[in-house]
Image (cartoon, helix red, strand yellow):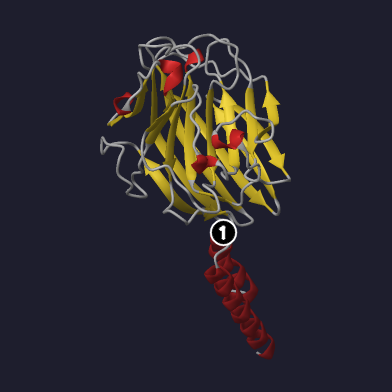
């Protein structure tokens, strides 16, 4: 066979390998261990429930959030003003403390999961559900227990002060419209920054909006995903919720590393009593950057081809 043809055939598998994606799983949580207290990455993580008790008459307690083989279930309290504005935050961490996952150029951090809401109001208010990926801060201060604050419906904690990242806001109701991508500014150190999903303009900036209608069906799981792709000094952001997609390129990024996932629920979009079920949570990083071994192998084939060509000419 012609040596140059042999070289091309030999190099093909390596070229394909060099351009293929490598993947790193950070968390693959299906709650099959039926508990939420243990951090055992990558198969399980510890989950904490954070609410403000004043808005719900002190009715919330740890039993409102439970794990089973069917997923992580938050049950809305049925006393107090449980269906008028209370928020509940479900927070977990997908790396070891002090080691957030930095994103290099060409890498993509992705989260995907399913949600099921037992009873949906057809509210048109956007943002009654929010979720996001964050960096827990330079000091890596983390929430380590359930907490029920004494303030209003939105839980606050100083651990969130320096948490930069991105959030998605939406309402799954049948007639609800509006999906947003929001950037949380880690540098904004003020009282409003102690709420992880703060709506204060100094803390959270809405960088993309759409009139998408999610149109979920009550008690039926729907798919949710969000990806952050590093391209040079920018992020390509994209979220798909029940088949509806919103995307944006952020050229002024707020976090270069991530270790925290959170979901916030506002009861205004859920009937009473309501349950929210989170399941099949997967968080990971993919990269299209070739491995050094691929480069070395291709370089070796190049040298082999050069030798073969020289021998053929000498013959």
Asked if residue 15 is positioned above or below residue 129 in the image, the reply reads below
Which element type, helix, strand or loop, lies under badge 1? helix
- Which part of the image, by quadrant, shows the N terminus? bottom right
Quadrant housing residue 273: top left
Tell me what residue is drawn at x 49 percent, y 9 percent. 121
Q: Left of 109 or right of it: where is 222?
A: left
| Residue 21, visible in the rendered structure | no
Tell me if 8 is positioned left or right of 114 in this view.
right
Viewer-closest of 120 and 262: 262
The residue drawn where x is 36% and y is 22% is: 60
Q: Quadrant of the C terminus?
A: bottom right
Residue receiving disc 1: 16
Q: Residue furthest right?
A: 251
Visible residue check, residue 39: yes
Nearer the observer, 130 or 241: 130
Number of marks present in the image shown: 1
Q: Splitting the image into 4 quarters, where does residue 44 fall?
A: top left
Q: Pick out the residue farthest to the bottom.
A: 314
Name which residue lies at 47% across and 16% down: 267
Q: Nearer the viewer, residue 46 or 213?
A: 46
> Where residue 12 sits: x, y (%)?
57, 63
How packed is label 1: few (under 14 Cα within 10 Å), some, or many (20 or more)? few
Residue for point 52% across, 32% down: 131
């Amino acid at each position: 066979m012609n040596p140059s043809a042999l070289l091309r055939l030999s190099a093909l598998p390596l070229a394909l390998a060099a351009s293929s994606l490598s993947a790193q799983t950070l968390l693959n949580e299906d709650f099959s261990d039926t508990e939420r207290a243990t951090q055992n990455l990558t198969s399980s993580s510890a989950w904490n429930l954070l609410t403000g008790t004043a808005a719900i008459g002190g009715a919330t307690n740890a039993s409102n959030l439970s794990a089973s083989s069917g997923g992580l279930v938050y049950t809305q309290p049925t006393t107090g003003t449980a269906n008028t504005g209370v928020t509940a935050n479900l927070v977990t961490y997908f790396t070891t403390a002090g080691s957030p996952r930095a994103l290099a150029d060409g890498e993509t951090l992705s989260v995907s999961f399913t949600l099921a809401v037992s009873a949906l109001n057809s509210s048109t208010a956007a943002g009654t559900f929010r979720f996001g990926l964050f960096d827990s801060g330079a000091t890596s201060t983390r929430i380590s227990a359930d907490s029920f604050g004494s303030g209003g419906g939105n839980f606050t904690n100083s651990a969130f002060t320096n948490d930069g990242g991105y959030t998605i806001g939406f309402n799954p109701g049948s007639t609800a419209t509006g999906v947003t991508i929001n950037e949380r500014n880690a540098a904004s150190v003020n009282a409003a920054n102690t709420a992880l999903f703060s709506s204060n303009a100094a803390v959270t900036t809405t960088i993309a909006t759409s009139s998408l209608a999610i149109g979920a069906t009550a008690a039926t799981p729907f798919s949710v995903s969000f990806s952050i792709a590093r391209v040079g000094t920018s992020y390509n952001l994209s979220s798909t919720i029940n088949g509806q997609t919103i995307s944006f390129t952020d050229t002024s990024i707020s976090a270069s590393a991530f270790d925290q996932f959170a979901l916030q629920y506002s009861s205004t979009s859920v009937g009473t009593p309501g349950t929210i079920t989170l399941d099949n949570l997967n968080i990971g990083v993919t990269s299209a950057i070739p491995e050094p071994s691929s480069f070395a192998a291709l370089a070796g084939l190049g040298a082999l081809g050069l030798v073969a060509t020289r021998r053929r000419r000498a013959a």
